[in-house]
Amino acid sequence: MSENNADAESNAKSVRVFYDGACPSCVRDRHFYERISGERGEDVEWFDITDRDAELCRLGIDPQQALRELHVQTADGKVLREMDAYIELMRRTVWLRPLAFLIALPVIRPILARCYHWLVGRRLKRTGRD
């Protein structure tokens, strides 16, 4: 997809989610989100980061960081990462909105962030992409 096509497509969607399409659990998470999000899921553009380092760099996203943290670009072009990205996605879905509220709590957020980084690090090491 050319840069102009990517920009035109993202303008038609409310958010763009950068996910690791080479990661089976990431793909499962995407499908789960699509199933439970209903019509709101149509506002999400899924951008597989696999082998797209140049495009990520043009968007100001470090490809290595994109492997380690979920990134979401909002309609206004702002890029959210890690827990902020998850909260943005979850707030868009009725079923996940309460979970987004919990994740955003100051006591819970740093604990989940540490667990998230640990799990991602394990996954990348296990698959030889660390």
Image (cartoon, rainbow, N blue to C red):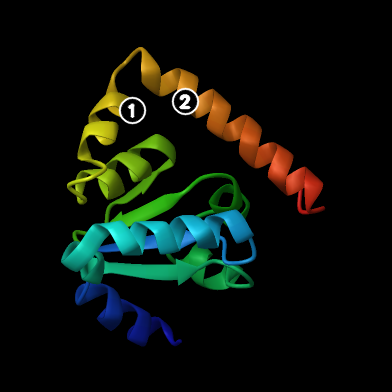
- Judged from the image, the secondary structure of the residue bearing numbered disc 1 is helix
**Identity, as a three-letter code, of the amino acid under mark 1:** Ile
Q: Is residue 4 visible?
A: yes
Q: Residue 12, percent across and down? A: 20, 77
Q: Nearer the viewer, residue 112 or 96?
A: 96
Report the residue marked by disc 1: 103
Relative to 126, is 115 on the left or the right? Answer: left
**What crowding class fits label 2: few (fewer than 14 Cα within 10 Å), some (14-19), or many (20 or more)?**
some
Answer with the quarter of the image where residue 17 lies.
bottom left
Relative to 91, is 31 on the left or the right? Answer: right
Q: Nearer the viewer, residue 26 or 19?
A: 26
Which numbered dot is residue 112? Answer: 2
Q: Is residue 14 visible?
A: no
**What crowding class fits label 1: few (fewer than 14 Cα within 10 Å), some (14-19), or many (20 or more)?**
many
User: Tags 1 and 2 in contact by the CB under 8 Å rule?
Assistant: yes
Identity of the residue drawn at 23% across and 45% down: 95
Q: Residue 5, percent across and down? A: 35, 86
Answer with the quarter of the image where residue 76 lies.
bottom left
Spatial CA span between label 1 and label 2: 7 Å
Q: Nearer the viewer, residue 106 or 35?
A: 35
Q: Residue 110, percent across and down? A: 44, 20
**Identity, as a three-letter code, of the amino acid under mark 2:** Leu
Identity of the residue drawn at 42% across and 51% down: 71
- Judged from the image, the secondary structure of the residue bearing numbered disc 2 is helix
Of labels 1 and 2, earlier in sequence is 1
Height in image: 67 above or below 112?
below
Q: Nearer the viewer, residue 32 or 62?
A: 32
Q: Residue 70, percent across and down? A: 47, 49
Relative to 96, is 70 on the left or the right? Answer: right
Height in image: 126 above or below 12?
above
Identity of the residue drawn at 27% across and 52% down: 78
Identity of the residue drawn at 33% across and 28% down: 103
